[in-house]
Image (tube, rainbow, N blue to C red):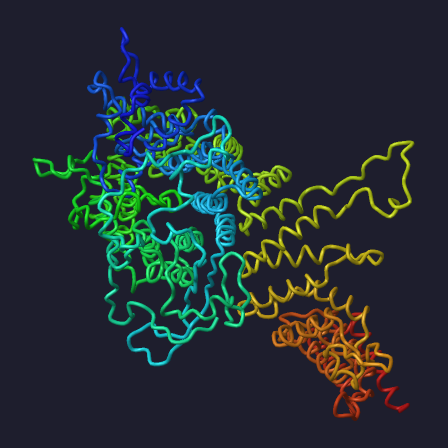
Amino acid sequence: MGTSWLEVLEDPLTRKLLGHEATLAEKVPFVAGVQQRLKFLLQDPLKHLSLAKIGYSALEAFLQANCTGPPLEFDPATVIFPESYRDDIPEIKKEMLKSLTTDGIDAYSLVPQVELFWLAKSILDNDTLAGEGFNGRRARFRVHCWHQKLLLEQSDTLQDAIFGDAAILESQLASRLAHGGAAAQDHMVEFHIERANIRIFYGHDTAARQDLVQASKLRGFEFALTGALGKKTKFQEKEISQLVVIARSNDIEHELDSTGVASSADEASRLEDPAANHAGQYPAQSEDCRPIAENMSNILNTNGTLNRDKAAKPENILLNDDTLLENIQFSNHTADTPDPTTNIIADRAYLPPSLASVDPADQPKLQPIDSIILLAIASSITNTQASSGLTREETTPYATRVLEGGSSNWSVYSQGLLVRSRIEGYRSRTAERGLLQLQALVDQVIAETASDTVTSRTDGEADSSNPASASSFLPKPTKEEGASVAERLQFVHQLQPPFRWDLEAELASRWVAMGGLKTALEIYERLQMHAEIALCLAATDREAEAVAHLKRLLFVAPDQVMQDGDVVSLNKPLPAESPRLLCILGDIQQEPKYYVLAWTVSEHRYARAQRSLGRFYLKKHDLSAAVEAFTAALRISRQDLATWFSLGCVYLELEHWQLAVEAFTKVVQLEDKDAQGWSNLAVALLRLPSPKPSPTVEGTTVHDDEEDQPTFDPLQHTLEALRALRRAAQLKREDARIWDNYLTVAASIPPNPEHPERGTPWQEVLHAMSQVITLRHKKEGESCVDLKILEALVDHITAAWDYPSSEDESTATKADQLMQTSDGGTIVSAVHRLPFLVRALTTLIDGQITPLATSSPQLFLLLSKVALWRRRPAESLALIEKSWRATGNLPDPSSTELTKSTEILVNAYRTLGPMERERTGGLVEKGWRFKARSGVRSTIGRLKTKGEEDTEEYEQLTRLLEDLKVDKQES
């Protein structure tokens, strides 16, 4: 079918499919005609391979024209549209764009060469071709991924289709890998990387990193994020540890991979072994689909390997900072056990042998696919946490490794620059370089993808209808200066670079962040991104201009949009993404009727309209209407995490506990790391009614081994809530409220002497209490200690274990010692070892609670009880004295409180005073009788002052004083 895109698209079969040869009495619509002819041609299995080549050629020609460059050397419209349709091309392109709309979400309205992508999707998005083998399934998987990137928002329908095909592909590749299929390992690596990228797009970062781990294992690619001594600033004298990625590609590589030009697993770069293909199977693209790599002599050595010094690369903007060095200057490197998803290692002893000898300042070149893995890991980490300083420090070394010692492949290097610019945009010292680098990348893409017909306009003005018409600071490179088409497209599916208009929109958003609003607006206006224009205006307190702009686009009479609450008339035809524009208008004016109109315009397919409506009703506390709106949105967008969360919150407000449990269960299924979702799930579970025992059926036989097993667990929901809070606390360790709830739920589980494992989880109670105190003690002091739970904890431990005597106390926390016997056996020594729970309690008391105790009588009493249990009578008595004083210092203590506190004090003097003092010996308190009488007299005096001589408490204290006098006389 030829040796270039043009020859494939001008093949007789392609012309037949597109209707160039059709001779009809009446002209049929172009789109419908192609679809009808495609159905007819698919009936012949012998044409499946050729049709797949056509579809894949169209897809990669589209990616060349809009992602990688260089410009196509032919006009796709001339090739694809028959002569009889030339006058209708603008309308046909609008119909093609409309056909790409999914779930009410439009594609970007100015997609250049959209006819190429439409043709590719029409052919490859086909059950017949996808069902016949691995290559057809992968082709559909890839075209769906690019379709999603063309849309302005995420589509649940495409997401389901993508991951459905991915599951089948994984199964097929696993089977081929197990049977040693040709290139199965390389295909599996590429699949994992591509699925990781689409998972990153949808925000499934953890799952994406698992894919990347599998890819690196299959390739034998070793890397580690570790530390090495070095200098980062120009005036730094002492070397300190700097983060660095140590990486080495597997030495055993395919010969062509080392050139950076071709890969053995590249999509349909060659026909597979015919023996591996069953009847009707085909590769998604053959060698014929690729253009001949011209002018390669300028980047290849005589032996065919890549000359990395001459290889074309995008411009790497220098930092030019007065303090920071361009690159970290390393001397030595040091490197804990690795994290399984990011390979973080903090001790050099744990580095793999192949990496231990690598010099951080002079690392070996990486294979392109390995560089892509590192860039994908960086993107997966920064996807949702790019503004986190710790995240930036962790991810920068991945991009740096690729740029300073990674692949010199043009596309890989460009992606490395893009990833680094995204990371640097959040730090003041690197924000300027990040912005300039992004600008340089945009200029490069514009220069590389702008066709001659656009850049050589005679009127000297840019064509506002084409994103490629933007002016560029960089000259258009010649063939000798630029990278070849083969090199640019080699890893396009694994890198999934942004389309040029997306890259420009990202540049505009960066200008907004830097305060360059005028520049940002110019970019958005040229790209005709009306929603972004309105958002940019609204964000700068120019809401009136934003509203006027949106109304001009949407309504016939912008100044009379609302009359008696009704919409007058919409423009015909409506602009692209009109549902989104209506929702933005509703957001700015807080008018729900625009959301309703957006829902109507999208033919009840645009989920955001209902989400916005639900949030509006939620603010107005119209909970029933909010439930209805969120439910309608979820019927369209079932995977939207925020909508499920909002719906769950509404159900909590309405006290629909079971529905709230279902909503938050869906939240944590979609995002396992949503701490607030786990916490709210626990709240809903705790409010559910206790499970009821199932009725016993007469005649049912109960086996002996089932007698001890309960037919139901009344604590089922409590235990489930505890597990949910445990997960929430793991994810959000700095949230005191979550830890407090965790503590309360754990302590609420009653003890179970028969089955301790089903009883109160005392270790979790201790851990949660420790965390609550750690997070709250600075602001709340001793009030952060839950006295009821602490009392229960102390009662349990002091009743279950005896504290060792003073002789054993010094060794109480040491590990059990083993003694060797004469026969070679071992016995446990008599040295007593405290259980973990006891040691944890004493650590909590000594390290966290005792320093906080200042004014709480009850807390002092609890500490006294623990001290007495630890065989420290003097300390116990001192704490009881503090409790008595704290009671007297209360703002307005009652006579009952004063009397009870005094009785406790007197009993402590009687019991503890005559005992032997710990450590130093002697009596605890020689003058305990005198002190006891003094304490009673003091309390009696306070009651007299308050005029309470006739109360029962006063009489109790008088009798107590008389008893002390009798004790003195008897002694």
Seen as rendered, the residue at the extreme front is 303
Res 20 visible? yes
Name the foreground residue: 137 vs 543.
137
Q: Is residue 89 left or right of residue 262?
A: left
Quadrant hosting residue 526: top left
x 31%, y 41%: residue: 499
Q: Is residue 778 left or right of residue 286?
A: right
Q: Which quadrant is the C terminus positioned in?
A: bottom right
Quadrant hosting residue 459: top left
Which x, y percent locates residue 913? Answer: 80, 86
Which x, y percent locates residue 599? Answer: 41, 27
**Number of marks in the rendered image:** 0
Q: Which quadrant is the N terminus positioned in?
A: top left
Q: Is residue 417 left or right of residue 163?
A: left
x 26%, y 46%: residue: 484
Above or below, 892 against 752 in this view is below
Seen as rendered, the residue at the extreme top is 25
Q: Is residue 416 left or right of residue 672?
A: left
Res 626 visible? no
Which x, y percent locates residue 436? Answer: 24, 56
x 20%, y 40%: residue: 450
Which x, y percent locates residue 158? Answer: 45, 33
Name the foreground residue: 538 vs 408.
408
Above or below, 550 against 318 in this view is above
Above or below, 848 against 658 in this view is below
Name the foreground residue: 744 vs 929.
744
